[in-house]
Amino acid sequence: MGFIEDGRQGDVVTEAARRRTFAIISHPDAGKTTLTEKFLLYAGAVAEAGAVKARAGHRRAKSDWMALEQQRGISITSTALQFTYRDRVVNLLDTPGHRDFSEDTYRVLAAADAAIMVLDVAKGIESQTLKLFEVCRARSMPILTFLNKYDRPGRDPLELLDEIEEQIGLRPTPVTWPVGIPGDFRGVVDRRDGSFVRYSRTARGASEAIEERVDPVSASAAEGEAWHKAIETVSLLEEVGSSLDMTSFLAGESSPLFVGSALTNFGVRHLLDAVVDLAPSALPREDLAGVSRPLAAPFSGFVFKIQANMNPSHRDHVAFVRVCSGQFTRGMTVMHGQSGKPFSTKYASSLFGAERDTIDVAYPGDVVGLVNASGLNIGDALYEAEPVTFPPIATFAPELFASARPRDTGRHKQFYRGLVQLEREGVIQVLRDPEGDPMPLLAAVGAMQFEVFAYRLANEFGAEAELTAAPYKVARCTDKITAEKLRKVSGIRVLARVDGTLLALFDSPFRLQRLESDHPDWRLDHIVSAGVVP
């Protein structure tokens, strides 16, 4: 289960230094969820693990708690998992791997201090998730890279280094380097001391891999040509200056790189140690004005995720709050920045996937689950004593659109109750016409969002939906002045989100391009800032 010292009243700055809060991002099937499970294994948070964990006759990933995730075998919602490792409190934010849920991943990245980029050694960087990697790079977020599945046939790792630098602008600096080609993985050279770490498999990868640290002379004798080729490559990396550099890593300019196989547990310990040794601890967060709020300042935090029905037996919803400053104490009364009203934190939990433990205290870097926090929304700030407003969490402009109505008109109330809840969670964007048609239009980044919307509406609210594709092809964020002009142009519709943000919908990307060319002063933005009324 999750871990925070219940009775500890230690110094806030000291406790913040013990925290490591990071997200794992990847393209689908790169092994992100498997890696998450193995981190829990090596930290002792689970006694036995594989790519999935057997429980009650079902095979399911610990972090994939939603029934649809277990049916499809993919992560479609983010999860917070807290555990201890080497006297550090680790907050692991598992994210969806599929591009269609990139908005959820973006929100999680707002709460993380670092990220692990997992790449399949056979596929490298795929276009569908390039946007997420670029977002991390644009935010100068420290990124660790893990070349996964090296126990299977794949591409030359040097080729992947070039790809990372060319496509993301992030300079990879290998810390470990493989001995053997993809599919014939002997172990890794640890460039920090030049030793060879040889791995041995365990049954189904259910327990920690057997690791043997071998001196270079013995490694040369045992591995022959594979060892010599690895050493030649390591020498080349030294010559071109591709070595670990903490300054550029923390600035988001270079990325310490590790090689392994999450399925067999090869290289997992190296990567988890790197999270503790290299990733930054919780640091002061900037407010909307760009002023850093000190860690020791009174409590503050922001909501980065809302999730309902994580535990069907409870039928409640949880607000995920990233603690930014001060000490959180369960039961404390804080101020809700958006409403200006007091907010009670009586029902607070630490999170471990869908499972919860009551939490008494938390420190900067921790994630607190506030149960039945019906008045909170994504991006909201909570604070004690000194008011604070954090920068809004941006979202992507939607790319797909559909109208929705209940199949059974007798379930009208359930349909709209579910619509409001799933909109609050960010599962789907709901657009409404402030001047006309009362029927809402659904908007999404990817088609699978519609599938999740319909699934949850039917299973959690008892209202099946009928979705009909809308003719719009592209959307841009706009303001009131531009909106008035756009309403006079054919083929364009202007709708509003619940927070007041205006979106202009175009039936053709060519119409958008023409308008941008003819009217460069009109506001047509790709990214929409949540909570900001233009």
Image (tube, rainbow, N blue to C red):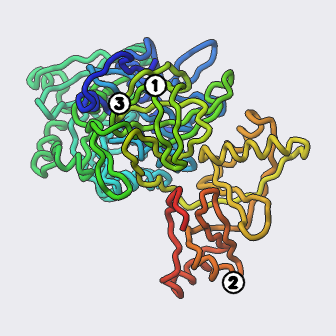
Give me the residue at 41% from left, 42% from top. 111
Q: Position of residue 53 (x, y in %)?
A: 52, 18
Q: Which amino acid type is shown beneath numbered disc 2? A: Lys
Q: Secondary structure at mark 3?
A: loop
Vertical placement of 356 versus 109: above or below? Answer: above
Foreground label between 3 and 2: 3
Q: Secondary structure at mark 2?
A: loop
What is the spatial separation of the Cα atoms under label 1 and label 3, in whole angstroms? Answer: 10 Å
Question: Callout 2: 10 Å neighbours few (<14), some, many (20+)?
Answer: few
Q: Position of residue 173 (x, y in %)?
A: 21, 45
Pick whichever of labels 3 and 2 is earlier in the sequence.
3
Question: Callout 1: 10 Å neighbours few (<14), some, many (20+)?
Answer: many
Q: Which amino acid type is shown beneath numbered disc 3? A: Gln
Nearest the viewer among 347 and 504 is 347
Residue behind mark 2: 488
| Left/right of residue 24 with respect to residue 232 in the rendered view | right
Q: Position of residue 527 (x, y in %)?
A: 49, 63
The quadrant of the image that shows the C terminus is: bottom right
Nearest the viewer among 232 and 462 is 462
Q: Position of residue 166 (x, y in %)?
A: 31, 59
Nearest the viewer among 328 and 518 is 328
Q: Secondary structure at mark 1?
A: loop
Q: Which mark is residue 330?
A: 1
**Cβ atoms under marks 1 and 2 closer than 8 Å:** no
Going by the picture, which residue comes out furthest to the bottom? Answer: 518
Question: Callout 3: 10 Å neighbours few (<14), some, many (20+)?
Answer: many
| Left/right of residue 490 with respect to residue 92 in the rendered view | right
Vertical placement of 287 versus 150: above or below? Answer: below
Give me the residue at 44% from left, 15% from top. 46
Residue behind mark 3: 327
